[in-house]
Amino acid sequence: MTIQDIQNDIIDEFSMFDDWMQRYEYMIELGKSLPLIDDSSKTDDNLIKGCQSKVWVDAKLEDDKIIFTADSDAIITKGIIAILIRVFSNQTPKAILEADTVFIDEIGLKEHLSPTRANGLVSMIKQLKMYAIAYQTQLQ
């Protein structure tokens, strides 16, 4: 499934909800299904800078695709990183680097986050793309 297909699925899922309370509840549920990072990977190196909450992300390259795992100490933030991992995990570094994140605007996520959470969202995307840059250089 392409990144765009996954984003379209997320847009469709979020459009089923009438208000943002329901969408937040859905994000919390998504956070519960997050592929959890191994406790040994919860290090300062894997901590995303720029997030108010603690968010750890780890990545591994398998068959030229990046597999992300993550965790957070905050339930909304855990839901946000779960959505991002759903979009970017199991994709090639090139696909991740070329992808836009139009779905964030489409579902209205950024405008319904506090400024500090919105900054954290940007930091999460930046970190996922940094992993893609690192793995892309390994593949060349």
Image (spheres, grey):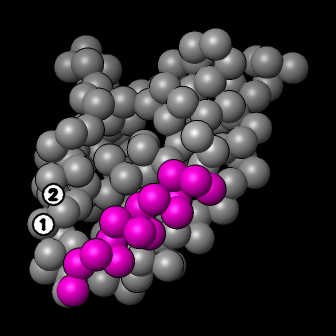
> To which residue does mark 2 refer?
28
Q: Quadrant of residue 25?
A: bottom left
In the displayed structure, 64 sits above or below 7; it is above
Image quarter in which the N terminus is found: top right
Residue in view at x 20 percent, y 86 percent: 19
Residue in view at x 32 percent, y 47 percent: 82
Q: Is residue 7 magenta?
A: yes
Amino acid type, mark 1: Glu
Question: Most prominent secondary structure in the magenta stretch?
Answer: helix
| Residue 36 horizontal/vertical position (percent) | 25, 29
* Residues shaded magenta: 4-18
Q: Is residue 92 magenta?
A: no
Mark 2 and mark 1: Cα distance apart in space? 5 Å
User: Is 124 situated left or right of 20 in this image?
Assistant: right
**Label of residue 130 in the image:** none
In the displayed structure, 62 sits above or below 8; it is above
| Residue 122 horizontal/vertical position (percent) | 49, 63
Q: Nearer the viewer, residue 7 or 72?
A: 7
> To which residue does mark 1 refer?
25
Q: Quadrant of residue 34?
A: top left
- Classify 10 Å Cα crowding around label 1: few (below 14), some (14-19), many (20 and above): some
Q: Nearer the viewer, residue 78 or 90?
A: 90
User: Is 123 situated left or right of 66 in this image?
Assistant: left
Residue in view at x 68 percent, y 54 percent: 99
- Classify 10 Å Cα crowding around label 2: few (below 14), some (14-19), many (20 and above): some
User: Is 32 situated left or right of 17 in this image?
Assistant: left
The extreme right residue here reads 140
Say if residue 89 shows up in the picture.
Answer: yes
